[in-house]
Every structure is written in C-alpha cells, then in structure tokens.
Amino acid sequence: NFYDSTVEQYALQPLEVLSLRQMLEFGKDAIYDKAKVLKSARHAQRELPKRLARRLMDLQFLPHIFVKNPHIKRVYDAYLHAFDTLRSLPPACTPEDNARLTDILQRLVDEHAPMLDALASGLRESSSKPFVGPKLPNLDAFFDSMLRSRISRRVIAEQHIHLAQRRPGFIGVIATDFSLREAVDHAAQRTRQVCTETYGFSAEVVCTGNLRASIPYIPIHIDYMLFELLKNAMRAVVEAHRGRRGQPPPPVVVRICDAPSSVTLRISDQGGGIPEADIERVWSYGYTTADASLRSDSGGSGAQPASFGSTMTQLPRPLTSETAHQIRSIASGAQMVAPSAGASGPWRMGGLGFGLPLSRLYARYFGGDLQLVSMPGYGVDAFLTLQHLEGDWHEPLAEHQSAPFEPEPHTLNAYP
Ligand code: W6P
C-alpha cells in the first residue's frame, strides 16, 4: 500500500512545538507582516501531516475489529484524506498560496468536527459488544494521544487561519486578557439552562475569590472545561436534591484563586460525592454516570448529532459581556477549536463519557491541570489550574508519542 510507507516516514519525523508564549510573541505583529504569515503557513504545513501520520500509525496498531468499526473507520479515512491533502500542497510562498492553504485548513477543520463524536460512538459500540467488548485492550492511552494530538492540530490550524485577522483583544485565536469571572458566568448560564431543560430546576452558581483575574488563553478551551465541570457538579447537586423540592438546592461555588504563575478555579458542589468504586473510572474514556436518557446521543445512531458542529451557535441567550463576544467570535470563525463530544447536539446533562478526560487534556495542554477531590457523602471539589505566561510551559510533546516505534525526537522552541 502506497500510503503505508509514506505515513510511516512522516510519523517518524520530529515535531516542532510551540508554547503559548511563543505563539503570542510570534503572532503579535503578524497582521502587519506578510512574511510572518507565510512562515506560520509553512509551520502548519510541516506540522499537520506529521501529527496526522502519527495518529494514522496508532490506529493501525489497534485491534482490527476495532478499527473496522464504521465510526473509527470514518476517523481513519478522514485523517488519511487530510494527510494526503496537506502533503500534496507545495509550501506556501505567496499570499495566494496562503489563501488557498487557509481555505483548505478551514475546510479540514470543519470536516473533522464530527470526529470526536465518531470516536466516542466507535468506543461505545465496540465495548458494548458481548464478544468484542471484554477483549478490547484499555484504550485510555490511545484516546489520550488521539485527542491531545487533535487539540494540537486544531490549535495550529486555527492559530494560522486567524493570525492575519485583526480582532481586538486577540492574537490569532488567543484572547490576550481573558476574564475568568466572565468565562465562569457564561458557562454557568448555559449550564443552568440545560439543567432546567433536563430536570425542571437548577442550582445557583456563585462565583467568589479574585473576580478580576485574567489570563491569556483560547476562550473556547476554558469554556469547554468549565461547562463540563459545571454540568457534572450541577447534575450531582440536582439529583441529590430530588425529592427535597421546596428548599432550593445548595449552590455550586466557584472560587477564583490568582497567583503569580497560575490561576486555580475550585468548583465545589454538595452533590454527595463520587462513589468510591467509581473514582478511578471518572478519567476513563466512555465512562459516564449519567443515565442513557440524559446522554446527548440517546435515541440517535450516535454517529453525529443532527446539529453537529453548531455547538456555539446554540448559545441560549446572547450575552453582552466581552467574554461571550470572544467565545462567539471564535466559534463563528473558528469552530475547529470547539470540541464537540458531549457538548454537541442538543445540550443535555450527560455526555459521551469524554468530558472529564478531555477537559484534563485541555488543562494540561497549556501546562495546567485538573484534579477532583471527592468527599463521599458530601460533594466534590474540582480544581482547575491554568498557567499564566510566566509558567514555564511547552507543549507536552513526549506524550504525543504513544506509538511504540517512535523514538524520542524533538526540537524544542523551533519556530522556523
Ligand atoms: C460529582 C461528580 C463530578 C465530576 C466532576 C466535577 C464535579 C463532580 N461532582 O458528583
């Protein structure tokens, strides 16, 4: 097969990684600098095929019966198509080349939007089969590198697509001074809305601590994490509170803690805690405590919610805040950064079991972390830490390399 050796060659090439700080520094005057934009174009052209190739190789190492699943097969085909498309473009040397590349990147970004749901559906279908399910290996490491790589590809493509666009408060897709309080308020509003639609009532979200804290970040990443965490917290509170209608349920309390090198958000709920037997599994892909009736895919084929890709167009009520504006302006031009599993389709309280592990990948991607502390019988505290630029961060490259054949090649800080 022609592609196999080509894919393998690309997969073996070292990656070039960038920090958030480097992306900001590189991008800050790009709207005035055509040469810079072309440099960024060629960086994207070099990086994306290598990263796609690594995932194609990973997929080839999985059990045949898993990769033949129609959902997983679709992901493989989409990645192979993207690999082939990008590889066959000559390096961008003129603004016209770049315009063509940018169009192709945007198209690929859009085409790949459903792949997260496809992965989740493939996993669920395969693991629910009575013969295949119990024989599947643990796929958490596979999904971690699959989704971490997806985050990186979407950041690379989106940052390039938006690099030459002037948007106040942004460098590319990075909001340079993103207010956490507004991010919390925005996610809380949507969470309450979806909770009310599902249960008929919702819990208040109280935001305390340093309400002025802000960081440079990609708004849609924070929004995804907060929405996931608030949905989990609120679902627990509301389910624990059923049958005690009359009194209001205890609020979900978000405390914003600002330090020189990081910001930590502590999200506290009084939903009774996570059953001890489930504590490890919450980080497992496909695990969900939500009833099937709450899942956003229930009733459908699971392949693709009808309204796929429109996550951000379903904002219940337009906010006038700058945060809502930032999130929407990214979503309209740059859907690709928006993850979709669990949050896509009609919003429901239960996801596809990707929300927590994927949120942790987002947090870790820019040097932060996500931890849960469960107090059985009381509730859960979720700690979401995000780095300020001062944090000495670079892309977690080593973790990209899940395939056993890969050596440890890397070129740090090698923006061309
Ligand atoms: C729960 C389970 C959970 C997961 C993530 C965040 C908060 C919570 N609360 O009961």
Image (cartoon, rainbow, N blue to C red):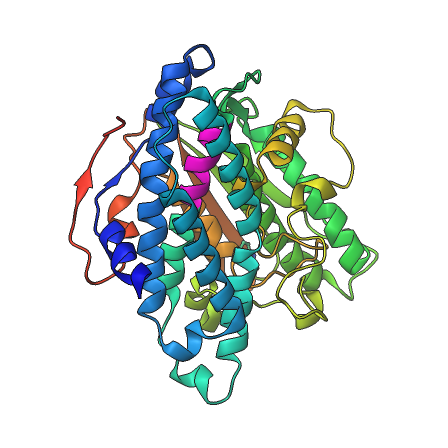
Between 237 and 79, the residue placed more toward the observer is: 79
Quarter residue 301 falls in: bottom right
State left or right for residue 363 relative to residue 305. left
The correct choice, above or below, for 233 with respect to 336 in the image is below
Q: Is residue 157 magenta?
A: yes
Q: Residue furthest top?
A: 32
State left or right for residue 112 relative to residue 260. right
Q: Is residue 286 visible?
A: no
State left or right for residue 361 relative to residue 356. left
Could you tell me residue 101's position as x and y percent? 46, 33
Magenta residues, start to end = 151-161
Quarter residue 391 falls in: top left
Q: Residue at x 23, y 53 (%)?
A: 9
The quadrant the N terminus occupies is bottom left
Q: Residue at x 70, y 43 (%)?
A: 190
The correct choice, above or below, for 60 with respect to 112 in the image is below
Could you tell me residue 332's position as x and y percent? 65, 34
Q: Which residue is drawn at 74% across and 30% down?
A: 319
Quarter residue 45 falls in: top left
The correct choice, above or below, for 249 with respect to 21 in the image is below
Between 236 and 55, the residue placed more toward the observer is: 55
Q: Is residue 358 magenta?
A: no
Q: Which residue is drawn at 66% across and 30% down?
A: 324
Q: Is residue 190 visible?
A: yes
